[in-house]
Every structure is written in structure tokens, then in C-alpha cells.
Amino acid sequence: MNYLPLCLKLDDKPCLVVGAGAVGARKIAYLRHSGARVVVVAPTLSEDVLAQVADADGITLHQRAFRERDITGKQLVIAASSSPDVNAEVARLCRASGVPVNVVDDTDACTFVVPAVIHRGPVQVAISTGGASPVLARTLKMRLESYIPSAYGDLASLVQRYRQAVKHAFHAVRERKHFWERVLEGPIAELVFAGRLTEAEHSLKAAVANPQSASQEQGEVYLVGAGPGDPDLLTLRALRLMQQADVVVYDRLVSPPIIDMVRANAQRIYAGKKKSDHAIPQGGINALLVQLAREGKRVLRLKGGDPFIFGRGGEEIQTLIDEGVAFQIVPGVTAASGCATYSGIPLTHRDHSQACIFVTGHLKDGTSDLNWDMLANEQQTVVFYMGLQGVDVICRELIAHGRKATTPAALIQQGTTPSHRVLIGDLNSLPALVRSNDVRAPTLIIVGEVVSLHEKLKWFRPGEELIAPAVRDMHDYFEHSHKRHKS
Ligand code: SAH
């Protein structure tokens, strides 16, 4: 059975709700949202309903049984009484006199069904399963809730204020449509989403006042952290920007399943980032981002983990600022956080560790450039990024500077991906452990008493059966997929 979705104007129109229990209370709130005047008829009134009446005008209560004449003059009626007989009677009378009626939990008796609704100011998204499954409608609503930025209401209100002005500025319908598309998918919308409403309005005003310049598209760079590997760890904002980018410039650390989630027809540029594999040097990347944005493109600069943690995000943004290119930055789950959590290793713990330090293990000239005295302090967790090559030096120096050789240490390989693997030892044994296992990048080293909790707290066991044979070895998957994207 297909229904006709409509948006009904109910402002100040009388509607009837029969029943005033918990369900009735929800229906009253639903109708009130549209500005309807709600008349409630019920022999008993729940606390929920009484609370709503105290809070809002526009609700009239009649504490008594339903009477036939209650439906006279009503725009629509909702039967939410706990008595099926009363509901059936309400439905029969409404149908006989042509008043739209909804009966809670009885689709057959309804002449309209009530959708699940997502509210974003004047924007409303209504979901109906035609009464087949209200739970399914709510499930879908939850998914969409997280996908539609909360600021869509602000965006709609802003756009509404300028509709007339845009009509005057652009006479041709096609031009107008293009103008709005640029506003709604470009930097002005992004300013609204970032909470910079005044700047957004200023830009919109300028664009309307000067249609000529408005037609020159302005690009923007999104510097986005993609997290450590598991696509489920992407932020909602990252996902939204990934799906509206014209071009993506990505690093080796960004996992292939995440790259596959970028808008299908976005151009893909691999920027490398492995000692032996600098596809584009850093200076070249900075210049490329500027160039692409100047061409009017929405440029997604996608980085593993968080862009501001060993991600050189600061350098890239500095260039964009120098060149006057608009940008925004989206944090990501950094490898330390993702790997530790997925390994059941809390980075801090009241009994074991009062501090946590992130440090690069990429040692320029042997041992000299780290403050080993500070790193060797007890009661703190030290996380080494890029530490695989230097694992011998790291363990040796920590011991030499006073950290116990029995301090637990973990090496986590390809954390949060299907190839997530954890090697556990101590400062003494870790280097040999790494040598005797076929360890593959990227890896993270965690040193500290908290590592001993892994045995008790480990929970993430990527099941072999979940991984397709072709991608069982994530390393091959990374290699294969990056080649595929490069070509
Ligand atoms: N910006 C990134 C770090 C980039 S430096 C972040 O915030 O996570 C690169 C180093 O990060 C790698 O050498 C490795 O030590 C670590 N790393 C990134 N992803 C990882 C993963 N999935 N598993 C283990 N280590 C990872």
C-alpha cells in the first residue's frame, strides 16, 4: 500500500487527540510542532500531558469520555486511547464524516499514518514505511539524523531570507539554480556548518550583490583526519566532506576501504608518504592543494589518524593561509587512541599511569634527538609513532635512562583494521619479538604498566571468517588498492 506524502499546513487549526497517556502525550507534541491547536479528550490525564500543558499554549484539555461531536470542525484526529473500543469508535465516526484519522497501532483503521520526522528548523525529513514497521522508520531516522548536520536548519533559514534578493539578481531559472547549488554545497554552507553564521551571511550577501564574481567558483580545502583504519571510526563531518569533494589527495596511511567511501567520481591523487615512496614531496603537496582550490575545486586532503598529530597538517594549513585559500580542518582518531582502545590498553589508569606522551620514534641521527630522561619516568605511558625501525634504540635508551627492563611494552600492527595484531613483551624482549615475527607497517609502540592490562581487557579479535581471502593480508590490500587508485 502506497501513501501520498504531504506536508500539511496546520498553523492554529484545531486538531483532536483522544487519549492522554504516554502515547497521547507524544502525539500532542507532534501536532504542536506544526503550530496546530490541540484539543485533548481523555477521562484520565497522564503526568506527561499535564507537563506539556503547563509548558505550552494551544492545548485544551477535556477530562471526560469522548463524544461524537468532539470531531466536529477538526482538521484531523488521532485516536490514542488505551481502549481499542474507543479508538474504533473514533475511527468509524471520522471516516463517516471525512475527517482524516490516525489510530495508534491499528494501520487498517487509519486514513493517514504518522511518519518519523527529523527536524532541522524549517527542514523536515519524514520517513514512512506505510505502517509496515514503525521501528524500521525509527531506525532509518537514527541513521539519517547522524548524516544531516544539525546546522541544516540555520542554512535553510539563511537561504530563505535571501530567496527574493536572488530572484532579482538572477533572472534565468538555470542561473538561479546554479547559484543556489554553489551556495548549498560550497564554502558558504560550510561556514554555516562550522557555526560561523555572520561570515556566512556576509559572503552570501556579497555573492548576491555581485553576481559576476559569484559565478567565479571558489575552491576550498578540507583537511580531514581519516582515523587509523577502521572506516567506522570516521567522524560524521569527515564522511560528509568525503562525499562532496571534487578531488581527494590522500596518503598511504589512509585505509583503502575509506578511500572507497570518497565520492565515486572524485578525482583521486595519491600523495605517497613512506620513506621510500614519496610520490609527491611535501612542498609539492602544499602547492598542489593551492592550485586545485584555485581551480575552484573542493579539495579533500585526507590523512591517516589526526592531521595535527605527526601529520604535517600545520604546514599544509600555513601554506593555505599564506595563499588566502579557504579551508577547514576535521580531527580524526589518532593511531594512539585507536590502537590502544582496540587492544584493550587504556592509555592512562589511576593505578598505573597519570600521563601519556606521544612521541616520534623516527630518530634522525641515532639516539640524540629525544629527551630520554623525561621519557624514562615511571607512572606514564609513552606512545611511539613511526618507531618500528628504531625499536632497538627506543628500548635500549629507555632502560639506559632508568626505566625498568621489565616495563611492559606492546607493538600494535595495522591497528583497528582486519589485520590488527598485538605483540606483547617488555623493554627487554620487544626488539627480539619484533625480529621473530613478520611485522608490517604501520605499527605503534606503547610502553608502560598499562600494557599489562591487555591480557584482561582485550576484546577486539578481527575474525578470519569476516575477511575475504583476497584481502586477508591487509598489507597486500593496501599495496594493491593504492596501485589501483594510482593507475
Ligand atoms: N597522523 C597520524 C600519524 C601519522 S605518523 C595519526 O594521528 O595517527 C605515521 C605513524 O602513525 C605510523 O608510523 C604508525 O606509527 C602510526 N600509525 C598510523 N596508523 C596506524 C595503525 N593503523 N596502526 C598502527 N600504527 C599506526
Image: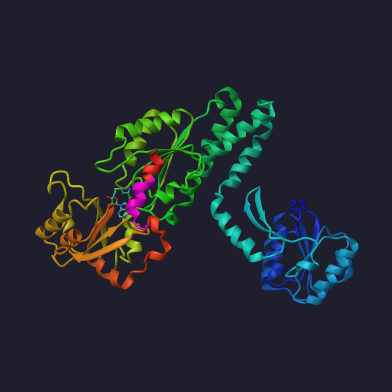
Residue 138 placement (x, y as % from top left): 62, 62
Which residue is at the front of the view, 222 or 56? 222
Taking 53 as reference, is 286 left or right?
Answer: left
Which residue is at the front of the view, 106 or 277? 277
- Of all residues shown, which one is farthest toward the left? 400
**Any part of residue 262 in sight:** yes
Which residue is at the front of the view, 131 or 383? 131
- Prevailing secondary structure of the magenta residues: helix
**Quadrant that contains the C terminus:** top left
Which residue lies at the image location 69% right of the left edge and 32% below the top edge?
A: 164
Which residue lies at the image location 87% right of the left edge and 71% below the top edge?
A: 67
Taking 150 as reference, is 384 left or right?
Answer: left
* Stretch of the chain drawn in magenta: 472-481
Which residue lies at the image location 34% right of the left edge and 47% below the top edge?
A: 479
Residue 86 quadrant = bottom right
**Colour mode?**
rainbow
Residue 429 placement (x, y as % from top left): 15, 64
Which residue is at the front of the view, 426 or 268? 268
150 part of magenta stretch? no
Taking 313 as reference, is 88 left or right?
Answer: right
Q: Is residue 316 above or below residue 369?
A: above
**Any part of residue 321 in sight:** no
477 part of magenta stretch? yes
Which residue lies at the image location 28% right of the left edge and 40% below the top edge?
A: 277
Residue 281 placement (x, y as % from top left): 29, 34
Q: How many marks?
A: 0
**Quadrant that contains the N terminus:** bottom right
Residue 442 placement (x, y as % from top left): 29, 52
